[in-house]
Amino acid sequence: MRLGFIGTGTIASAVVECIAGDGHQITVSERSRARSTDLAARFGVSVADNQGVVDASDVLFFGLLPEQAAEVLPTLSFRPGQRIISFMAGVTLDGLAPLTAPADPVAVMLPFPGIAKGGSPIIAMGQTELINDLFAPQNSVYSVENEAELNAYLCAQAVLSPAVKLVADAAQWIAPKVSDPAQAEDFLRVLVGSSLMANDLAPLLQALNTPGGYNARLREHMDAEGMQAALAHGLETLAARGD
């Protein structure tokens, strides 16, 4: 498949790395020169200006900021039959269509940096069959029905940062108390990651809810300190902004 990437930031570079070994003909834009040069050196992808990417591709991925898209896309000449997958949260497919006619914006895809190595979630909206064909099953594609659902997923995924911060703070707390701080941090990462991957949340919480146990006591303390209320307020604040 002939794939092109306009905008070669962190996410686009990770997506290229994910599929570079799958036999596709990949062309990336020369914007973000350091990243495009690195991708060419490591994976043999082609590098071109934006119009060159369009001309060389049947499926295009847009990794631009919304304001960049409004400036860059009207200067390009697309052709019928080209399909477009956007990484741009906040730019609707209907809003993208006039900028890319006669090409067809078919889907929004919101990947995460872990896609580079596989095993990462992908939020997808629109005609997601193409995304599944390219990125599943090595990654998990979660399809949403509309912009409201997409925004809800975007808000909820922000729990990742505070969750990582909790584990990082626990690792920092334990470091002066043990002989091998790096091992202790690895233990915490494996503990949390493997537990979440191996269990649904409700039964996992029930299993960790032994009265008087360490897990139950710490969770009860943090709930009493307002952690649950702070999380709910933060998510509602993100959802109200909608960007």
Image (cartoon, helix red, strand yellow):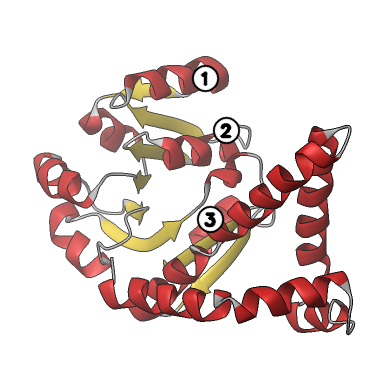
Number of the label disc, if any, that sits on residue 20: 2
Corner quadrant of residue 235: bottom left
Looking at the rendered structure, the kind of residue marked 3 is Ser
Q: Which residue type carries mark 1?
A: Gly
Label 3 vs 1, first from the N-terminus: 1
Quadrant in the picture for residue 114: top right
Contact? badges 1 and 2 (CB < 8 Å): yes
Q: CA distance from mark 3 to mark 1?
A: 34 Å
Q: Which mark is residue 127?
A: none
Q: Residue at x 85, y 37 (%)?
A: 183
Answer with mark 1 or mark 2, whichever residue precedes in sequence. Answer: 2
**Is 52 placed left or right of 182 in the picture?**
left
Q: Residue at x 43, y 67 (%)?
A: 154
The picture places residue 239, in percent across and down from the top left corner, at 35, 76
> x%, y% of residue 7?
31, 37
Nearest the viewer among 170 and 37 is 170
Q: Which residue is mark 1?
A: 44
Report whether residue 126 is seen. Answer: no
